[in-house]
Amino acid sequence: MIEYGHGKENEDESVCCVKSTLKTILEIQNKAKLPIFQGILQETIPFILYSSATVEPYFAIGITSASQIPFRTCFFRIEDLTNSSVQLSLLRPFDVEGNCIDTIDTPYRLERTNSKVMISIQCFCSIQCISPKLVNRQSIIVGHKW
Protein backbone atom coordinates (compact mmCIF):
# COMPACT_ATOMS: atom_id res chain seq x y z
CA MET A 1 0.00 0.00 0.00
CA ILE A 2 1.27 3.47 -0.92
CA GLU A 3 0.60 6.33 1.43
CA TYR A 4 0.97 9.98 0.53
CA GLY A 5 1.98 12.54 3.08
CA HIS A 6 0.95 16.15 3.09
CA GLY A 7 4.20 17.20 1.44
CA LYS A 8 5.43 18.01 -2.02
CA GLU A 9 4.45 14.64 -3.55
CA ASN A 10 0.76 15.23 -2.83
CA GLU A 11 0.98 18.82 -4.13
CA ASP A 12 2.69 17.70 -7.35
CA GLU A 13 0.04 15.03 -7.87
CA SER A 14 -2.84 17.51 -7.60
CA VAL A 15 -1.12 19.99 -9.96
CA CYS A 16 -0.56 17.14 -12.43
CA CYS A 17 -4.27 16.21 -12.29
CA VAL A 18 -5.36 19.83 -12.81
CA LYS A 19 -2.98 20.21 -15.75
CA SER A 20 -4.16 16.93 -17.29
CA THR A 21 -7.81 17.98 -16.97
CA LEU A 22 -7.10 21.40 -18.47
CA LYS A 23 -5.29 19.73 -21.38
CA THR A 24 -8.29 17.46 -22.04
CA ILE A 25 -10.73 20.40 -21.91
CA LEU A 26 -8.56 22.38 -24.37
CA GLU A 27 -8.37 19.41 -26.76
CA ILE A 28 -12.18 18.99 -26.73
CA GLN A 29 -12.73 22.72 -27.30
CA ASN A 30 -10.29 22.65 -30.23
CA LYS A 31 -12.00 19.58 -31.75
CA ALA A 32 -15.37 21.34 -31.43
CA LYS A 33 -14.20 23.82 -34.08
CA LEU A 34 -13.85 21.05 -36.68
CA PRO A 35 -16.83 20.69 -39.06
CA ILE A 36 -17.31 17.01 -38.19
CA PHE A 37 -17.82 17.83 -34.49
CA GLN A 38 -19.87 21.05 -34.77
CA GLY A 39 -23.07 20.70 -32.78
CA ILE A 40 -21.72 17.62 -31.01
CA LEU A 41 -18.86 18.98 -28.90
CA GLN A 42 -19.05 22.23 -26.93
CA GLU A 43 -16.75 25.12 -27.92
CA THR A 44 -16.63 26.26 -24.29
CA ILE A 45 -16.37 23.95 -21.30
CA PRO A 46 -16.65 26.17 -18.22
CA PHE A 47 -14.92 25.34 -14.96
CA ILE A 48 -13.91 26.60 -11.52
CA LEU A 49 -10.32 26.37 -10.29
CA TYR A 50 -9.50 25.97 -6.60
CA SER A 51 -6.50 27.74 -5.08
CA SER A 52 -3.71 25.59 -3.60
CA ALA A 53 -3.15 28.20 -0.89
CA THR A 54 -6.74 28.48 0.38
CA VAL A 55 -8.62 25.54 -1.23
CA GLU A 56 -11.22 28.17 -2.16
CA PRO A 57 -12.40 29.07 -5.67
CA TYR A 58 -10.06 31.35 -7.57
CA PHE A 59 -11.74 34.65 -8.53
CA ALA A 60 -10.61 37.14 -11.18
CA ILE A 61 -11.85 40.58 -12.15
CA GLY A 62 -12.63 41.49 -15.74
CA ILE A 63 -14.13 44.40 -17.63
CA THR A 64 -16.93 44.12 -20.15
CA SER A 65 -15.88 45.32 -23.58
CA ALA A 66 -19.11 47.17 -24.37
CA SER A 67 -19.84 49.06 -21.16
CA GLN A 68 -16.43 48.96 -19.42
CA ILE A 69 -18.13 47.75 -16.23
CA PRO A 70 -15.96 45.55 -13.98
CA PHE A 71 -17.19 42.13 -12.88
CA ARG A 72 -15.85 39.38 -10.61
CA THR A 73 -16.03 35.70 -11.51
CA CYS A 74 -14.77 32.24 -10.63
CA PHE A 75 -15.93 30.74 -13.96
CA PHE A 76 -13.39 30.30 -16.74
CA ARG A 77 -12.70 28.96 -20.23
CA ILE A 78 -9.23 27.68 -21.13
CA GLU A 79 -7.54 29.46 -24.04
CA ASP A 80 -3.95 28.17 -23.91
CA LEU A 81 -1.79 25.86 -21.82
CA THR A 82 2.00 25.72 -21.39
CA ASN A 83 4.14 23.56 -19.10
CA SER A 84 3.79 25.97 -16.20
CA SER A 85 0.92 28.36 -16.92
CA VAL A 86 -2.60 28.58 -18.26
CA GLN A 87 -4.38 31.40 -20.11
CA LEU A 88 -8.02 31.72 -19.12
CA SER A 89 -10.96 33.70 -20.49
CA LEU A 90 -13.30 35.02 -17.85
CA LEU A 91 -16.93 33.91 -18.10
CA ARG A 92 -19.41 36.46 -16.77
CA PRO A 93 -22.13 34.87 -14.58
CA PHE A 94 -25.80 35.93 -14.67
CA ASP A 95 -28.89 35.04 -12.68
CA VAL A 96 -32.19 33.94 -14.24
CA GLU A 97 -33.31 37.57 -14.71
CA GLY A 98 -30.13 38.57 -16.55
CA ASN A 99 -28.38 40.36 -13.67
CA CYS A 100 -24.62 39.91 -13.35
CA ILE A 101 -23.84 38.03 -10.13
CA ASP A 102 -20.76 37.54 -7.97
CA THR A 103 -21.12 34.12 -6.36
CA ILE A 104 -19.76 30.59 -6.31
CA ASP A 105 -23.28 29.23 -6.77
CA THR A 106 -23.96 27.83 -10.23
CA PRO A 107 -25.34 30.70 -12.30
CA TYR A 108 -28.29 30.49 -14.66
CA ARG A 109 -26.14 31.65 -17.58
CA LEU A 110 -22.47 32.28 -18.43
CA GLU A 111 -21.33 34.75 -21.08
CA ARG A 112 -17.95 34.64 -22.83
CA THR A 113 -15.89 37.81 -22.50
CA ASN A 114 -12.65 39.16 -23.97
CA SER A 115 -11.10 39.47 -20.48
CA LYS A 116 -8.19 37.08 -19.96
CA VAL A 117 -5.72 36.14 -17.24
CA MET A 118 -2.48 34.16 -17.36
CA ILE A 119 -1.62 32.28 -14.17
CA SER A 120 0.71 29.54 -12.94
CA ILE A 121 -0.77 26.05 -12.81
CA GLN A 122 1.07 25.58 -9.49
CA CYS A 123 -1.52 27.92 -7.92
CA PHE A 124 -4.32 25.34 -8.25
CA CYS A 125 -5.10 22.11 -6.43
CA SER A 126 -8.38 21.07 -8.10
CA ILE A 127 -10.83 21.83 -10.88
CA GLN A 128 -14.62 21.55 -11.15
CA CYS A 129 -16.27 21.45 -14.56
CA ILE A 130 -19.62 23.20 -15.05
CA SER A 131 -22.33 22.35 -17.59
CA PRO A 132 -21.47 23.75 -21.05
CA LYS A 133 -25.22 24.34 -21.55
CA LEU A 134 -24.92 27.43 -19.32
CA VAL A 135 -22.73 29.26 -21.85
CA ASN A 136 -24.67 31.90 -23.78
CA ARG A 137 -27.98 30.48 -22.50
CA GLN A 138 -30.89 32.88 -22.99
CA SER A 139 -32.14 34.76 -19.92
CA ILE A 140 -35.74 34.47 -18.91
CA ILE A 141 -37.51 37.79 -19.43
CA VAL A 142 -39.74 38.52 -16.49
CA GLY A 143 -42.62 40.79 -17.49
CA HIS A 144 -45.28 42.58 -15.53
CA LYS A 145 -48.45 40.73 -14.65
CA TRP A 146 -51.52 42.64 -15.77
Image (cartoon, rainbow, N blue to C red):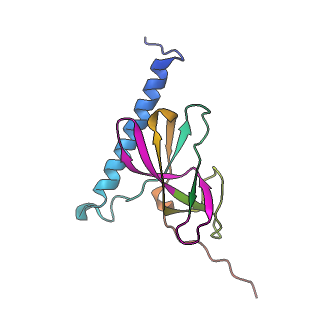
Is 113 colored magenta in this rendering?
no
Tell me which segment is drawn in magenta: 64-90
Q: How many marks?
A: 0
Please identify the quadrant where the N terminus is shown: top left
Instruction: Name the residue furthest top.
Output: 1
Question: Does residue 67 lie above or below 71 as drawn?
Answer: below
Question: Does residue 8 lie above or below 124 as drawn?
Answer: above
Q: Nearer the viewer, residue 125 or 2?
A: 125
Left or right, residue 27 beside residue 129: left
Residue at the (49%, 67%) spot, across then down: 136
Is 74 colored magenta in this rendering?
yes
Q: Estimate the x, y position of residue 33 in percent, counting from the top left.
A: 29, 61
Residue at the (62%, 61%) spot, across then down: 70
Q: Estimate the x, y position of residue 23 in percent, counting from the top left.
A: 35, 42
Question: Does residue 139 lie above or below 11 as drawn?
Answer: below
Instruction: Name the residue furthest left.
Output: 36
Task: Name the image quarter holding residue 24.
Answer: top left
Q: Estimate the x, y position of residue 36 in percent, counting from the top left.
A: 23, 62
Left or right, residue 108 beside residue 32: right
Q: Nearer the viewer, residue 2 or 112?
A: 112
Q: Estimate the x, y position of residue 72 in percent, counting from the top left.
A: 62, 55
Residue at the (48%, 19%) spot, across then down: 8
Instruction: Name the residue furthest bottom.
Output: 146
Task: Name the image quarter holding residue 54.
Answer: top right
Question: Does residue 38 lie above or below 140 as drawn?
Answer: above
Please identify the quadrant where the C terminus is shown: bottom right
